[in-house]
Image (tube, helix red, strand yellow):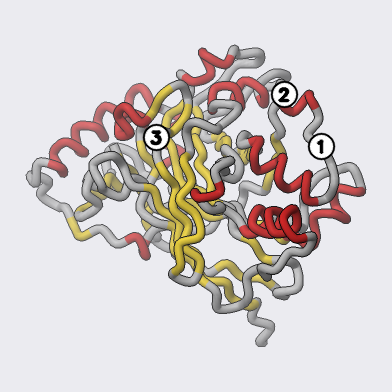
Amino acid sequence: MKLATLKDGSRDGQLAVVARDLSLAHYATGIAGTMQQLLDDWNFVSPQLEDLYATLNDGKARHAFAFDARLCMAPLPRAFQWLDGSAYLNHVALVRKARGAEVPASFHEDPLVYQGGSDDFLGPTDDAVFASADGGIDFEAELAVITGDVAIGTAADSALESVRLLMLVNDWSLRNLVPAELAKGFGFLQSKPATAFGPLAVTPDELGAAWQGGRVHLALESRWNGRRVGLAEAGPEMSFHFGQLIAHVARTRRLRAGSIVGSGTVSNEDRAHGVSCIAEKRAIETIESGTPRTAFMQFGDAIRIEMLGRDGLSLFGAIDQRVAPLNHGP
């Protein structure tokens, strides 16, 4: 099924079920008020929402209304945890090679994961607001899963069973702030502003055969100012599948329902697939000519990220955002 959280003036919004073709929606009122309520009582609530989903797709839902992604918050507007990996080692290798560094052997055995801010996510069409364009504004097209409860020490295969929903991600980064933060040895903070998510969270069965081995075997499109810059295959080159990422973060602590785990920037060795972030494009330029030519995003720039299912329908809806300046008015 496909789910959205609609704006209602509250911080957590109102849960709604969305038709498979994204034409209609129906509030989940009387079943679950918010996404977190669903996740906290998944086994009881989700079958009721599946029934509503079937009724909606059959055109028999009495109180259905036209779906509008502009009315959506992030599917989980604030979460208990946001843990983002870097599971596409081609992206890691390119960025490191551009600065003359190799990929350590351990990176092939142990996933890279950082803990981001999870109290304030952006909706799919919300402006991405920055105080300055000098920070090196960059989009990052990714995928993520929302988990149920995960016990300490859960193995990777078992961890996959905790995946409740999948989402589209734009993990905004301020690239010019990254080096100084990493030099401190304490990880990202100011270089990682609020993350944006696509309008829909979908259950794995919606992906059909494209959901294999904890990976999404579909293409992820990125359009910067209307021009396609990436059509990256998300499945084959994901070095660590979502079960492995979840198991990694649960090695020494349990995860509670509503934790989000991201894939990191989707990346392919074949450069014909383009890029899912500007930093990778700049890294390729540096490797090829010694100097990056592509500038980072400026105020007024737009980014659209979307993934189509094998039926040609938009799977998660689209992230469609603009970069905007912080308003310093009274």
- Earlier-in-chain disc, 3 versus 2: 3
Question: Residue 78 vs residue 315: left or right?
Answer: right
Name the amino acid, label 2.
Answer: Asp
Mark 1: give few (<14), some (14-19) or many (20+) Cα within 10 Å.
Answer: few
Q: Residue at x 66, y 35 (%)?
A: 89
* Residue depth check, mark 1 versus mark 2: number of the one nearer the observer: 1
Mark 1 vs 2: CB contact within 8 A: no
Looking at the rendered structure, the kind of residue marked 3 is Leu
The amino acid marked with disc number 1 is Glu
Which numbered circle lies on residue 38?
3
Residue 110, compared with residue 38, is above or below; it is above
The picture places residue 321, in percent across and down from the top left corner, at: 49, 66
Residue 199: image location, x then y, percent: 39, 53
Among numbered discs 1 and 2, the one appearing first in the sequence: 1
Q: Secondary structure under badge 2?
A: loop
- For image coordinates 78% across by 45% down, the residue present is 97
Image quadrant assignment for residue 164: top left
Q: Which residue in the protein does label 2 denote?
A: 110
Mark 2 is surrounded, within 10 Å at the Cα level, by few (under 14), some (14 to 19) or many (20 or more) other residues, namely few
